[in-house]
Amino acid sequence: MSRFDPEARRMSLADNEVTRWLLFGLVFMTAWEVAATAYDAPFLLPGPSRIFAEFVRAPGLIMINAWITTQEIVLGFLIGSALAMLAALVLLVVPRWLEDFIFRAVITLNSIPFVALASLVVVWLGANTIASKVAIAGLYAFFALVYFAHKEMLSTDPLKEELLTSYNADFGQRVRYLKLPSALPVIFTSLKGAAMAAVNGAIVGELFGAFQGLGFMILDSRYVGNTARVFVAAVLCTLVGWIMLGILAVLERRFVGWHLEMTRQT
Amino acid sequence: MTTANASEGSATAARVLVSVRNVTMIYGGGTVALKDANLDIGQGEFVSLIGPSGCGKTTLLRLLADLIEPSSGSISIGGKSPAEARRDRAYGYVFQAPTLMEWRTVLANVLLPLEVMGFPREERQRRAEAMLALVGLEKFADKYPWQLSGGMQQRVSIARALSFDPQLLYMDEPFGALDEITRENLNLELLRLWRETGKTVIFVTHSIPEAVFLSTRIVVMTPRPGKIETVIPVDLPQPRDFETRETARFFEIATEVREALRKGHGYEVEV
């Protein structure tokens, strides 16, 4: 047996993922509660119990705001990711010079500080609808995905490309049988990043101009010194992100289970 | 010593299937990869292209497969251009690397060309299963390629190349990355496949014993510029087995190939 046997580091306490999360949550919350109690400055650092109490004070109102932000995040994520995949595919078929040109445009856009871009989008699309927030969340998600999706579909194994040439495959078949499946592991990793980016985008959008949503709630509660409610908003954002990551992880196992299996075995 | 001139490199028995006339291939940088090549290959032959790196053997195979186009000269495959032959799915190509899709099971990999080519579902399944049985891997149908050894992967690749029943099988150093023992076993298996399917095989290698063991004719190529030096017929009786490698005739032909390789520039060649 190897001296560096990875099995030796195997966790003994909790073998399954959910149990490990629950255990971590319990330890973390307890530590937080203890620290908050000892520090005793609820306006700076409220403990989990105080945050939960704040939520219970107005669950309906908070959930309405959370629902609005969730819509922005999910719509932004779906639209942004779909457009990123479409763009990645279009970039494969356009002439070389046009691909180069578009790519420069993408890189330039990407290097503009997102916060500046977000404030502009709010100006363009208005603060009173969710459209501007969806657009910002979508923009964040788009840039988190488009580069990697394109790069992966472009840099397929040349031998596999030649194999398909020998079958006289057309472009659609190349995408279906080679480019997409071989890029899928990286696409899933990027989609997780895009989901997180969409959460950020929606909140940033709401900070710049909104009259509802968790971002608005953060701003509003901060003004009146209700730190606990800022925490409630932050926790709910985190939860939305986690649920999306969870769904993506399930889809990943379903669609690129082979890759998870392969990296584990080889 | 029976050395035929390159221009006389004609197929002996059956009708000519592949005909290469004055083919020259010059790559972008000006490298002459292949110079004035002439070669006829008959239906059902097993022809090896042998030579050191840079002799143009892979270039010639890629030209036949229409993966590249010649700078000058003409190629005919069953009376058609290589482009037409490729569109008509005249050949199956086996690369040096197995080139299997990691996301597809072994069976699904053999199904791939059949799906691309639009075979009906039942026929696809039937053919793919038959091909896996032919290479003795039916028990591994549901495994993924990376769960198989290198030799098994290459057998899947051969099954895949044969699945749509092409006339020709092009093989580019298919066993080059395998260990000697696996390679000799696969050589034997390939000969069995060749006998059973009646395919015309064009096989690129840099191993002299492999070329002698497998081929009905050996095309000896030399580098700088890549050209066909000579064509050596192999009259070892069929079917061949492990003992064939120990016969005096085997060594005579191997020596003949080695000398031909030396004659054209004398670069070191793997033996």
Image (cartoon, coloured by chain):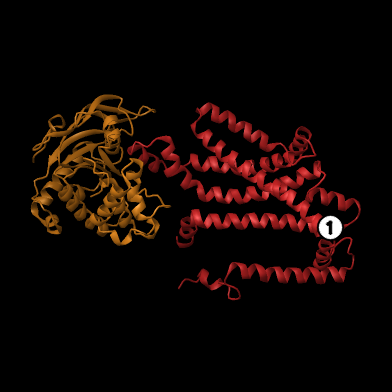
How packed mark 1 is, by other alpha carbons closer than 10 Å (few <14, some 14-19, many 20 or more), is many
* Between B187 and A80, the one nearer to me in the picture: A80
Chain A drawn colour: red
Q: Position of residue B68 (x, y in %)?
A: 33, 32
Q: Quadrant of the N terminus of chain A?
A: bottom left
Compared to residue A90, the image places residue B112 above or below, namely below
Residue B240 on image: x %, y %:
12, 54
In the picture, measured across the screen, residue A108 lies left or right of residue B19, that is right
Residue B175 shows up from this direction: no
Q: Residue furthest right?
A: A224
Residue B239 x, y percent position in the rendering: 11, 53
Q: Is residue A36 left or right of residue A70?
A: right
Could you say which chain is coloured orange in the image?
Answer: B
Q: Residue furthest front?
A: A60
Up the image or down, A184 lies above or below B220; here it is below
Secondary structure of the residue carrying numbered label 1? helix
The residue positioned 12% from the left and 31% from the top of the image is B8
Q: Amino acid at mark 1?
A: Arg
How many labels, in total?
1
Where in the figure is residue A207, as x and y percent of width and height?
Answer: 80, 45
Residue A101 in which image quadrant: top right
Which residue is under mark 1?
A229
Q: Residue at x 22, y 56 (%)?
A: B184
In screen coordinates, is B265 left or right of B11?
A: right
